[in-house]
Amino acid sequence: MVLWLIALCGALWWLLQAVCIMRTLRAVRPLPAGQVDTSSESGPLVSVICPARNEADAIEAATQTRLADPEPWMEFIFVDDRSDDATADILERECGHDPRARVIRNVTLPEGWLGKVHAQQIGLEHAQVQEQGWYLFSDGDTHVLPGAVASAIAWAECEQADHVAMTPRMVGGPLVLRLCLAPLMRVLICTLRLWLANDDDQPRAMGVGAFNLVRRSALERAGGLEQLRLEIADDVGLAQIIKDAGARSRSAIGAQWVEIEWYRTTGQFLRGAEKGVAKARTRIGIAVSGLLGILLIAIDVSPLVMLMWWPSPWALLAAATVAMATALSVMLAMSFGLPRWWSLLWPLGAVAGLLITLRSMALALIRGGVQWRGDTHTLASTSEGERVRLS
């Protein structure tokens, strides 16, 4: 009886995830190609704002990809956020060949701001985009291919949207990251309810740090980036304040338009994972989240464990569940531009993701806060500035 119950729980859990994934793939589609008529435009139509901090190992190639887009109606503003490596020098060298691009060096972080959001705000203050133009917020190490911005604007105009987020194709990265990508995508879909992001009647919204395109007038109506001063999930937060202000937000799969090597080393991945713990808000919240995570991962991999009782009836049910789980993982990888072969190892990825999360939680409990992009923030401060809830 107990074995049947475990097998049924695992099957129902994966059926629930299957419903969430299929609804997401129906609602969030690849971005179509498009063109923008700029014959009557005066001044930049788009200000591309790229914050960067200590990204000397990736910034050169990413900047070259951006500047390869020949559109004259784009301006590029790179904000070096207190880097202590060669990031700023590389940006100065690359931008010196393009009159559309300039580099702003920031050396301070005011109290009450997160570093990345503050760098984006600096970019806004230097932007010269026209009143009905657009801002593109995009992480400095992201490769945005020629035609991506024009296609996103064309789609936004077709959808009468004021915000477009595109998920990038993931390339390279350390082995442990590639192992975790498919399980992390499942978590993202389920916690953010990604299938609701393109539904104007639902409050959910989706933003992506690699590509967040927003109409200037809509951002101003939403209160600007000051609304996100202490929001750890600033990319999702941008979409949320736009939607909360009554504007339309749209999400698309941008695997053919945008790509990124999310983290280049295991150490970067581990440090990057630490910021998500802030969503637990308190030490008690962290402890509860940790216990819940252990329970869910146990259910997640339980069908694989049940195969030990082969060829019992419950093991047959578990085998069907494992087949479904594997198919879903591969489907996610193919749709969102994740490493396909690594998605076959979803049980290992799920366990590795849990261990990394538990490590981040332990560090947050010890520190009483989280570290992000070289800065330390208390749980109280990030909770105070929170605009994105995962409940």
Image (tube, rainbow, N blue to C red):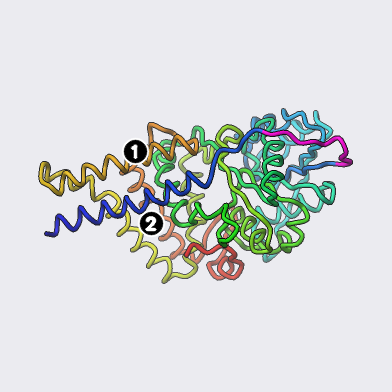
Q: Give the secondary structure at mark 2.
A: helix
Q: Where is residue 347 in the image (x, y as percent from the top left)?
A: 31, 44
Q: Disc 2 marks which residue?
A: 358
Give left or right: position of 203 versus 193. right
**Residue at screen point 59% across, 51% down:** 207
Verify CB contact (< 8 Å) between mark 2 and mark 1: no
Residue 22 lies in the magenta stretch: no
Q: Nearer the viewer, residue 292 or 29?
A: 29
Q: What stretch is highlighted in magenta?
A: 34-43
Q: Regarding mark 1 in the picture, which secondary structure is present there?
A: helix
Could you say where residue 297 lies in the image, as x and y percent from the top left?
31, 53
**Mark 2 or 1 closer to N-term?**
1
Magenta-drawn stretch, dominant element (helix, strand or loop): loop
Relative vertical location of residue 214 with respect to residue 32 in this rendering, above or below: below
Q: In x, y percent, where is residue 141?
A: 62, 38
Instruction: Find residue 220 and report its image quarter.
Output: bottom right
Q: Residues within 10 Å of mark 1 (few under 14, many from 20)?
A: some
Looking at the image, is mark 2 or mark 1 nearer the viewer?
Answer: 1
Asked if residue 267 is positioned above or below residue 1 in the image, the reply reads above
Residue 220 placement, left or right of 293: right
Q: Which residue is drawn at 60% across and 61% down?
A: 231
Q: Where is residue 96 in the image (x, y as percent from the top left)?
A: 80, 31
Q: Which residue is more in the foreground, 341 or 379?
A: 341
Magenta-span inclusion, residue 38: yes
Question: Which residue does the numbered mark 1 point to in the structure image?
Answer: 327
Instruction: Identify which amino acid the numbered label 1 is placed on.
Output: Ala
Badge 2 amino acid: Leu
Gap between marks 2 and 1, in whole Å?
Answer: 27 Å
